[in-house]
Image (tube, coloured by chain):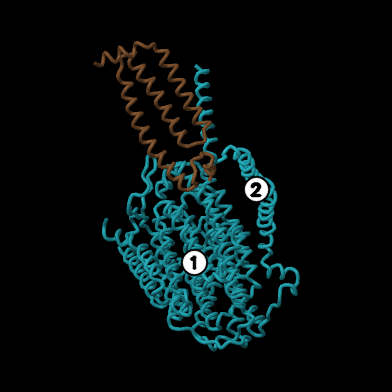
């Protein structure tokens, strides 16, 4: 079963995975930096996480080393925790300034 | 520890207990109760000392009582130990004996003072420190006591701290003592470096191997002597003692006449073996002592404050003792220390009784004719005056004549100066006596005799001033110099000293001194008892007399030489060093930080998206740096 999956992954060349990850990651960064909607920013963060996860699994399959997949699980866990905090901030933000525009958070220097 | 040693080491513990107890309970104790407690503990200490004294066998030469190990590290072993020998016992008897009397006297003298219990705590603390000073078997224990008495002296001079002048006097005493203490510390460092120990016995033993005038010994003894000049008020550090009279009179009697100021003499006698090896230092001591004796006596001539006269007299008498030390006459110096403690304590306490009787008046121009109203004080004061003048068979007669005999043997110049000083002493002491007690009363108060707690110490001290001389009665009067032989067991310097004058010479010296002294008394009687010749303000006096009345202008001289340059330096350091350099420098550092902050602050916009952008840019920059550097 596992061997089949690995074989399936190996059907696509490694460069493709790397390029896809790079694209996903860049889209994530661009979203975080340029979008103003906080929800989108959070989604972009998730996108970056998952691009890294994708890369890790690809390398794991190509190197026949399952340790990388352990990291993938860790990252998913941390991302889940991060999202709860992020969404909580989002809720508070909506309540306080009645907006999800990240530029409303302009008092962080105090 | 054998019983005698135990009792011996308990002596300083009693006043310490008293000091701690009274100090912690001072709000709840009345002055009288605190005074009685303090006095009882001092008497206890005296009894213990007397027991230790009676069981002591002088022929053993004494031994060291190790109380506990104190500083023990590689190459250094300084125990907390006492020296149980003739010299320590003599000083302890003096401190606890005279101390007890003065404690008792203070009960009456201080009974109106709101802070009397504090006073007694400090007085007990002083006794403790003084006992440590004379009992210590090494220089460090002595030094603890040395600093302790300095502290108590400071506290007690400034006891009435709401008078600014008294605080100034206290500070002056403290600072001048500190100058001497530097000498003491340097001496300790030198001796420790040379001998690897601070124990007197070991140092003295090893010093025998040195040649006379070895540089290290010259330095060490001179430094010790600097320490002694500070504590014992010798030229050039003597000006604090007259000002120290700001303290309550029992303090002047105990600290600034009988005990603390003799610490310097004790120290030199304790280290006599060292000083014997350095004739140079001995000569310095002789010159300084003689000069101080004369200088202080000359200042005493025209002072109008009853306590100031006695203060200069004390400085002068201390000068005699140092002159004796300089001539190697250690036993004569110690003899005079004890006799001086008796009659000078008596005189100070008598002066205190006069001041008490007149409600705080200290100016002798506003006294006079008091012999009728305060009889006991008068009689005892008269005895003290006769004793200090050295009238035959009184205590001062024997001790002073011994010093004069040594001076005659040493050099006619020293002898002449010291005799002249003795005549000055006689003159100003009788001037004081006549102006205070003879003639008619010139003040406005109503004199009344002091209470019994004050007059009893006066009578005891008067009796001691009369008969005290017997402890060292010379051969000439059928004695055998008991004190000298007793002290010789503890001090190599004393066993070495020799006085070889023919009996006729001694009689002639003694007779001429007595003759001169009595004629001086007669002269003083004519000027001050018959017609009470009063001095006006110094400005109206002829030049030389004015110089004396203004104390040779030494205080202004010191002010010009040291205080003002120091003040000038401080002002300059403030106006230039502080205001022009330090403040601009520190303010500049702060200002620069502020200015940099003002620029860099712009980065902190507080905008979340900007921060995110900055973070990403930063990460990318780091990535590039790591990639480029590999």
User: Going from the N terminus, do you reach mark 1 or mark 2 first?
Assistant: 1
The residue where tag 1 is placed is B255
Q: Is residue A80 above or below residue B502?
A: above
User: How many discs mark residues in the rendered view?
Assistant: 2
Question: How far across and down, in percent of the image, does residue B359 sit?
Answer: 55, 82
Residue B547: name its quadrant.
bottom right
Q: Is residue B568 left or right of residue B116?
A: right
The residue where tag 2 is placed is B583
Q: Residue at image x 36%, y 32%?
A: A78
Give the letter of the chain under mark 2: B
Question: Can residue B396 be spotted in the picture?
Answer: no
Q: Is residue B367 left or right of residue B254?
A: right
* Colour representing chain B: cyan
Q: Is residue B195 above or below residue B241?
A: above
Give the letter of the chain under mark 1: B
* Mark 1 or mark 2, whichever is nearer to me: 2
Question: How far across and down, in percent of the image, does residue B315 sit?
Answer: 57, 65
Question: How far across and down, in percent of the image, does residue B192 sit?
Answer: 45, 44
Instruction: From the viewer's side, name the closer residue of B50 and B211.
Output: B50
Question: How far across and down, in percent of the image, does residue B332 sit?
Answer: 49, 62
Q: Are marks 1 and 2 on the same chain?
A: yes
Q: Is residue B518 above or below residue A72?
A: below
* Colour representing chain A: brown
Count neighbours of disc 2 (C-alpha within 10 A) and say few if under 14, some if 14 to 19, many if 20 or more: few
């Amino acid at each position: 079963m596992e061997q089949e999956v690995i074989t399936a992954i190996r059907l696509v060349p490694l460069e493709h995975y790397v390029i896809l990850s790079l694209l996903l990651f860049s889209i994530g960064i661009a979203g975080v930096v340029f979008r103003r909607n906080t929800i989108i920013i959070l989604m972009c963060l998730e996108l970056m996480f998952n691009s890294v996860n994708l890369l890790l699994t690809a390398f794991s399959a190509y190197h026949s080393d399952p340790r990388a997949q352990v990291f993938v699980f860790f990252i998913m866990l941390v991302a889940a925790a991060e999202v709860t905090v992020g969404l909580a901030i989002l809720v508070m933000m909506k309540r306080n300034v009645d907006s999800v525009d990240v530029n409303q958070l302009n008092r962080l220097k105090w | 520890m054998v019983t005698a040693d135990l009792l011996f080491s308990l002596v300083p513990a009693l006043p310490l207990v008293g000091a701690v107890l009274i100090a912690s309970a001072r709000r709840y104790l009345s002055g009288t109760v605190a005074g009685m407690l303090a006095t009882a503990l001092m008497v206890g200490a005296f009894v213990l000392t007397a027991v230790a004294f009676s069981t002591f066998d002088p022929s053993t030469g004494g031994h060291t009582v190790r109380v506990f190990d104190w500083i023990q590290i590689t190459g250094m072993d300084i125990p907390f130990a006492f020296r149980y020998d003739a010299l320590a016992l003599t000083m302890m008897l003096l401190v606890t004996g005279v101390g007890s009397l003065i404690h008792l006297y203070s009960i009456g003298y201080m009974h109106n003072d709101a802070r009397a219990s504090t006073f007694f705590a400090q007085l007990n603390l002083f006794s403790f420190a003084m006992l440590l000073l004379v009992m210590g078997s090494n220089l460090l224990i002595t030094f603890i006591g040395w600093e302790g008495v300095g502290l108590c002296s400071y506290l007690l001079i400034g006891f009435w701290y709401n008078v600014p002048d008294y605080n100034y006097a206290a500070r002056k005493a403290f600072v001048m003592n500190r100058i001497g203490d530097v000498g003491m510390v340097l001496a300790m460092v030198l001796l420790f470096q040379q001998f690897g120990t601070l124990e007197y016995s070991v140092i003295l033993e090893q010093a025998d191997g040195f040649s006379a005038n070895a540089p290290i010994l010259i330095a060490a003894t001179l430094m010790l002597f600097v320490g002694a000049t500070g504590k014992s008020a010798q030229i050039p550090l003597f000006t604090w003692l007259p000002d120290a009279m700001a303290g309550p009179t029992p303090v002047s009697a105990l600290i600034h006449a009988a005990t603390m100021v003799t610490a310097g003499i004790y120290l030199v006698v304790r280290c006599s073996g060292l000083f014997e090896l350095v004739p140079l230092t001995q000569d310095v001591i002789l010159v300084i002592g003689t000069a101080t004796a004369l200088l202080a006596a000359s200042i005493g001539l025209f002072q109008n404050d009853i306590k100031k006269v006695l203060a200069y007299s004390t400085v002068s008498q201390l000068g005699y003792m140092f002159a004796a030390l300089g001539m190697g006459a250690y036993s004569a110096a110690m003899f005079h220390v004890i006799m001086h403690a008796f009659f000078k304590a008596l005189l100070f306490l008598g002066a205190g009784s006069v001041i008490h009787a007149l409600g705080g008046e200290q100016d002798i121009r506003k006294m006079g004719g008091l012999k009728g109203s305060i009889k006991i004080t008068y009689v005892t004061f008269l005895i003290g005056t006769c004793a200090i003048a050295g009238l035959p068979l009184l205590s001062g007669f024997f001790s002073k004549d011994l010093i004069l005999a040594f001076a005659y043997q040493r050099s006619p110049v020293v002898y002449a100066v010291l005799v002249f000083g003795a005549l000055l002493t006689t003159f100003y002491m009788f001037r004081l006596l006549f102006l205070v007690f003879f003639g008619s009363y010139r003040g406005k108060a109503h004199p009344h005799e002091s209470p019994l707690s004050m007059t009893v110490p006066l009578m005891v001290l008067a009796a001691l001033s009369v008969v005290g001389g017997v402890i060292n009665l010379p051969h000439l009067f059928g004695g055998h110099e008991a004190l000298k032989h007793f002290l010789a067991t503890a001090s190599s310097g004393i066993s070495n000293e020799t006085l070889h004058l023919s009996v006729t010479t001694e009689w002639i010296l003694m007779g001429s001194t007595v003759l001169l002294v009595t004629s001086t008394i007669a002269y003083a009687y004519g000027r001050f008892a018959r017609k009470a010749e009063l001095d006006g303000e110094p400005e109206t006096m002829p030049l030389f007399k004015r110089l004396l009345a203004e104390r040779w202008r030494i205080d202004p001289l010191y002010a010009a030489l040291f205080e003002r340059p120091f003040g000038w330096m401080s002002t300059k350091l403030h106006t230039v060093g502080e205001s022009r350099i330090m403040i601009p420098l520190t303010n500049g550092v702060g200002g620069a930080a502020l200015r940099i902050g003002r620029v860099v602050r712009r980065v902190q916009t507080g905008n979340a998206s900007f921060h995110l952008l900055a973070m990403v840019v930063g990460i990318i920059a780091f990535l590039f740096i790591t990639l480029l550097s590999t």
